[in-house]
Amino acid sequence: QVQLVESGGGLVQPGGSLRLSCAASGRFFKIYAAGWYRQAPGKQRELVAQITTGGTTTNYADSVKGRFTISRDNAQNTVYLQMNNLKPEDTAVYYCNRVPAVSSSWGQGTQVTVSS
């Protein structure tokens, strides 16, 4: 079973940047597509960015396209999310998981708060 630990969140002003990391345990994580999800208060969890196993293809939700970049380092079993030009509506708890997500693999997430 894959265990996922997210880090890198924090409080940032609008227009600022953060880089999230997701460390995965489990030898098979690298053979699956991976994604970053987020859940804002009172809203359902949504997939915002995904990447294929080799990292050659990425896809983004319209709300983050052009501002967020997903990447992965399979040698380190790590997935990253570079977030630029952050907006207050990006405030949420961010999680990583496989795509499609595996319910038993959700970690604690990392809180991102965008506020002046």
Image (cartoon, rainbow, N blue to C red):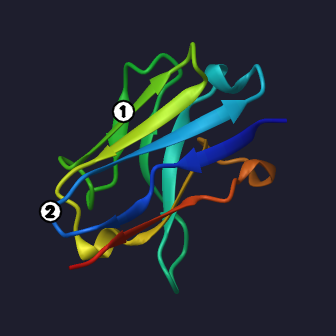
Residue at x-position 56% and y-position 40%:
22
Crowding around mark 1 (Cα neighbors within 10 Å: few <14, some 14 to 19, many 20+) is: some
Residue denoted by label 1: 58
Residue lying at the far right in this picture: please name it. Answer: 1
Quarter occupied by residue 90: bottom left
Query: In the picture shown, does residue 73 fall above or below 114?
Result: above
Q: CA distance from mark 2 to mark 1?
A: 23 Å
Query: In the picture shown, does residue 111 fall above or below 75?
Result: below
* Amino acid at pointer 2: Gly
Residue denoted by label 2: 15
Residue at x-position 43% and y-position 21%:
55
In the rendered structure, the answer to whether residue 14 lies left or right of residue 31 reads left
In this rendered view, identify the residue nearer to me: 78 or 34.
78
Residue 34: percent from left, percent from top: 55, 36
Residue 50: percent from left, percent from top: 45, 40
Residue 14: percent from left, percent from top: 18, 69
| Mark toward the start of the polypeptide (2 vs 1) | 2
Q: Are marks 2 and 1 in contact (CB under 8 Å)?
A: no
In this rendered view, identify the residue nearer to me: 23 or 65.
23
In which quadrant of the rendered image does the N terminus lie? top right
Q: Secondary structure at mark 1?
A: strand
Residue lying at the far bottom in this picture: please name it. Answer: 42
Residue 24: percent from left, percent from top: 67, 33
Q: Secondary structure at mark 2?
A: loop
In the rendered structure, the answer to whether residue 114 lies left or right of residue 93 reads left
Which mark lies nearer to you, 2 or 1?
A: 2
Residue at x-position 41% and y-position 62%:
10
